[in-house]
Amino acid sequence: MKKEKLLEVEQLNIKFTTSIGDVNVSDNINFTLNKGETFCIVGESGCGKSVVALSLTRLLPENAVINGSVKFEGFTISDLDDKEFAKIRGQKIATIFEQPMSCINPVMRIGEQIAETYRANFKCSKKEAKLQALKKLEEVKLPANRYNAYPHELSGGMQQRVMIAIALACNPQLLIADEPTTSLDVTVQYQILELLQELKEKYHMTILMITHDMGVVHDMADRIGVMYAGNMMEIAERDAFFKQPLHPYAQELLNVVKDPCHYTIPGTVPNLMEIFSGCPFEPRCQKATEMCKTYKPENSVRDERMVRCLNVIPN
Amino acid sequence: MSYLIEAKHLSKVFKDKESTVFKKKEIIAVDDVSLTINRGESVGIVGESGCGKSMLGKMLVGLTLPTKGSVNYDGNEISKLPYSEIKKLRPRLQPIFQDADSTLNPKFTVKKLIEEPFVINDISKSDANQRIDELLSYVNLGKELYGRYPHEISGGQRQRLGLARALSLKPDFIVADEPAASLDSSVQAQILQLLNQMKSNHGLGLVYVSHNLRIVSMMTEKVNVMYLGSFVETGDTQDVFDNPVHPYTKMLIGSVLTIDGDKRKLGKTKVFGEPPDPKNRATGCAFHPRCDCCTQICKEERPILKKVGDKNRFVACHNM
């Protein structure tokens, strides 16, 4: 069965222009999302994973220079002007963030915020919007009497549920979840992830999840993309990836997560202001050769698997 | 053999802000907790946020005094000593915090920050300088960092600087409160290995406070599971993780997502409820509103820690 593609990202380059020079946060990134799957982008802080996600809904600040093409349902959305794009953001692609408190309005009742999203996107009466909002509250398993609560009256887990309700107000096809459970307790994280999984199946949503937690990836992902220093190092199906990661960085990352008391990756994450002549992981890579210093690795693709390394060919 | 640290019936109670002259309201952060730590031993304290684990850690190193109970360090009862005496003990009892940044003065350079403990404790400059070089190479911080300010070094480096500062006066006892929580996994591993090395090289007692159960299971020999101010299960780490008895421990361990094995874990464990509010403590067993094997007695009577099996295991639950 051929999988239907929902989102295709090709040759995505993002850099920030700053007063002290350019910062390259995304270097020729290609990936696709199939309909109904969960794709996880995993990487350490500062590798550019959130920037890639934000660029998809044009939420980056003005000093970001974005090049590349993004196709949504076969339709190029990267060429749209901002007014047309506003119809896609929220209705087709919605985002939830790590810090719900910084995204929901602290002086507005949570029910009204959900209803507002609905009214902003569809023309309908206030009464109908309220009914819809109540329905959403029920879906995210918040009691209906919380409709009139203010955000500060809720716990962190409940705030995240409100955020999910707002994101889902217009039944988007793609949900971008940027570290949705990082600031939560394990027990609450578990419940939020269960909720996301349930809603995904109910609405046949596609989820693009950004995280640094391999445990979350292991449970949520259908396919995985590993990022390092603005490069997509490996893309693989979940089972194949956990069985045998191919890129040296992915291998070392898994080792460290499995056994942090015995493994480390020596060195530190590179500064993205420098321009790499070779592979950005070369200084920390144990399998690096002379070639890695001078030649930039290209994407080598086979079937569903992509690796960006000179020494590894997917088979 | 006497214990390095012996805490008996520790409690910490705060007055609630909403409390009035007519109606006294209290928040019980830590409630009747006893615990012992030997030299060279690492003990974990785990629980959800707000369960009082950090407060317990602070009481153990004498950063805050308990409302009730006592902490005994090497024959000295910390809670009864005058401030001047506690100050003399401070070099021996050291905390490491999650957010190293907030413990480092932003206007001090790295060099000055690491010198500070020596200056405060009147240690001669030549001795101090030798020790500083030793320490910084131990935590793998290069000399080129000496002149930098905290905001100019990375999070992992700041955390290592925090470790170096805690180690500087050769303590016997360290409370590490989520020392690696805000770091990336590769950097986290560096910090954990350093802590382990410190423990085995210097024979110190280590209390590891964390909500990350996976790391606690790897780092510690004994573990205490805390819920709303009191221990609900204590025992040898391996034993507790292999065979949890208390429903809360089961839920906590069940909700940790790991990369071991092929199977997904979501949906396998029943996890309900949110971390509780210490202001509205449930009657009887504090965990009963979230427990799936709750019975009538759980709502009425508070369970106490009872020995289970022949190993060193204590559990506070009515339905074992």
Image (tube, rainbow, N blue to C red):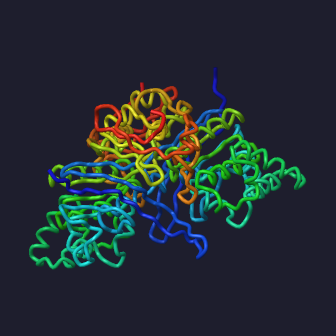
Q: How many marks?
A: 0
Q: Which residue, as the protein is rendered here, is positioned at the far left?
A: B126
Where residue A306 sits in the image (x, y, percent)?
47, 34
Q: Quadrant of residue B87?
A: bottom left
- The residue positioned 26% from the left and 59% from the top of the image is B174
* Residue B19 left/right relative to A171: left
- The residue positioned 26% from the left and 49% from the top of the image is B42
- The residue positioned 37% from the left and 36% from the top of the image is B241
* Residue B302 seen in the current view: yes
Where residue A107 sits in the image (x, y, percent)?
71, 67
* Residue A129 left/right relative to B45: right
* Residue A310 seen in the current view: no
Q: Tell me the quadrant of the picture where the C terminus of chain B can be found.
A: top left
Q: Nearer the viewer, residue B235 or A171?
A: B235
Where residue B140 sits in the image (x, y, percent)?
22, 58
* Residue A224 left/right relative to B160: right
Q: Nearer the viewer, residue A207 or A100?
A: A100
Q: Nearer the viewer, residue A262 or B29?
A: B29
Q: Quadrant of residue A233?
A: top left
Where residue B105 sits in the image (x, y, percent)?
34, 75
Above or below residue B200? Residue B13 is below
Q: Quadrant of residue B160?
A: bottom left
Q: Which residue, as the protein is rendered here, is positioned at the far top?
A: A1
Above or below residue A207? Residue B148 is below
Above or below residue B112? Residue A91 is above
